Image (cartoon, rainbow, N blue to C red):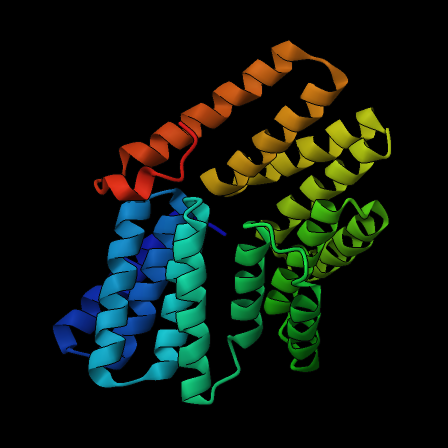
């Protein structure tokens, strides 16, 4: 993903849509621009665009559009660690998808909802994720399948099932490599690093986390970089390297401060650690 390029293209498309009053095209343009700002860490702008997209979708009466708009809003809130709000919007996306009779975005919505529940301590979301994955694979939806597999890797890690973490990260890496999904490759390396660390392979774990960090840096995603530095904090904390722990905690603080500085609504900052 090149978020700057996407942002510029989406802004141009949106300008055309506004000038020509192309409401049907305006919703995808707004959603795409919102996704670009999410990638750049501009969550206030991203949420504003998502809210406008939802308003337009409701005005023209297209529940199918609402399904992917609500899904993206949920992802914004999940990134900001506002998990209850994220869950609520995943459920709204699910309802909109069912109301529209459209299953295209359903696996990704289901995976997002499962991860939101998982991060609130629900460890029984496995069947939900497996069902979503089966649906995505049946339709050949590789991007959506990757999201489901990533969720299954996170679930396995939460349960301490290291063999399953390896299994799912290998599947995720293969799928991401074939589809050139760099945003999925970074978490694949990150979760593999987690598993190798748990198996006692500290050097190999650090190498995998380093690869995840390089990809996140190339992509330019604060969200992915935050996840990688968080994994490094855990890694160096366990092996007993306080200097490196302090370094990566400092990097996280820079990222979080940058995100928080862009938020005008204080309520959106309540899930942030600094």
Q: Quadrant of the C terminus?
A: top left
Q: Which of 66 and 23 is in front in this view?
A: 66
- Based on the displayed image, in which of its 4 quarters is residue 20 positioned? bottom left
Q: Is residue 175 left or right of residue 250?
A: right
Q: In this view, does 11 lie to the left or right of 5?
A: left
Above or below, 141 relative to 270: below
Q: Is residue 252 left or right of residue 210?
A: left
Q: Which residue is drawn at 66% across and 67% down?
A: 129
Q: Nearer the viewer, residue 229 or 37?
A: 229
Residue 82: percent from the left, percent from the top? 41, 48
- Based on the displayed image, in which of its 4 quarters is residue 246 positioned? top right
- Residue extending farthest to the top is 243
Residue 219: percent from the left, percent from the top? 51, 43
The reply to whether residue 274 is in sight is yes
The reply to whether residue 5 is in sight is no
Residue 222: percent from the left, percent from the top? 46, 38
Q: Residue at x 65, y 38 (%)?
A: 212
Q: Residue at x 46, y 84 (%)?
A: 98
- Numbered marks: total: 0
- Based on the displayed image, in which of its 4 quarters is residue 205 positioned? top right
Q: Residue at x 76, y 57 (%)?
A: 174
Q: Which of 17 and 45 is in front in this view?
A: 45
Q: Is residue 245 left or right of residue 48?
A: right
Residue 51: percent from the left, percent from the top? 25, 63
């Amino acid at each position: 993903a090149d978020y700057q390029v996407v942002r510029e293209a989406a802004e141009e498309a949106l300008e055309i849509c506004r000038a020509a009053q192309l409401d049907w095209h305006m919703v995808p343009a707004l959603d795409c621009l919102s996704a670009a700002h999410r990638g750049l860490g501009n969550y206030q702008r991203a949420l504003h665009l998502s809210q406008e997209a939802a308003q337009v979708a409701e005005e023209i009466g297209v529940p199918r559009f609402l399904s992917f708009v609500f899904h993206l809003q949920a992802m914004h809130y999940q990134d900001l660690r506002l998990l209850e709000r994220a869950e609520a919007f995943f459920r709204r996306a699910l309802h909109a998808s069912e109301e529209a009779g459209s299953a295209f975005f359903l696996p990704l919505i289901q995976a997002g909802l499962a991860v939101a529940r998982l991060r609130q301590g629900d460890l029984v979301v496995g069947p939900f994720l497996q069902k979503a994955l089966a649906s995505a694979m049946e339709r050949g939806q590789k991007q959506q399948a990757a999201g489901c597999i990533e969720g299954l890797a996170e679930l396995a890690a939460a349960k301490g099932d290291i063999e399953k973490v390896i299994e799912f990260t290998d599947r995720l890496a293969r799928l991401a490599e074939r589809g050139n999904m760099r945003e999925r490759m970074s978490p694949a390396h990150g979760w593999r690093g987690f598993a190798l660390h748990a198996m006692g392979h500290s050097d190999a774990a650090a190498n995998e986390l380093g690869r995840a960090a390089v990809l996140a840096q190339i992509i330019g995603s604060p969200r992915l970089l935050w996840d990688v530095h968080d994994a490094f904090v855990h890694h160096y904390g366990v092996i007993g390297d306080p200097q490196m722990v302090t370094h990566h905690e400092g990097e996280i603080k820079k990222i979080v401060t940058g995100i928080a500085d862009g938020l005008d609504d204080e309520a959106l900052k309540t899930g942030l650690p600094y």
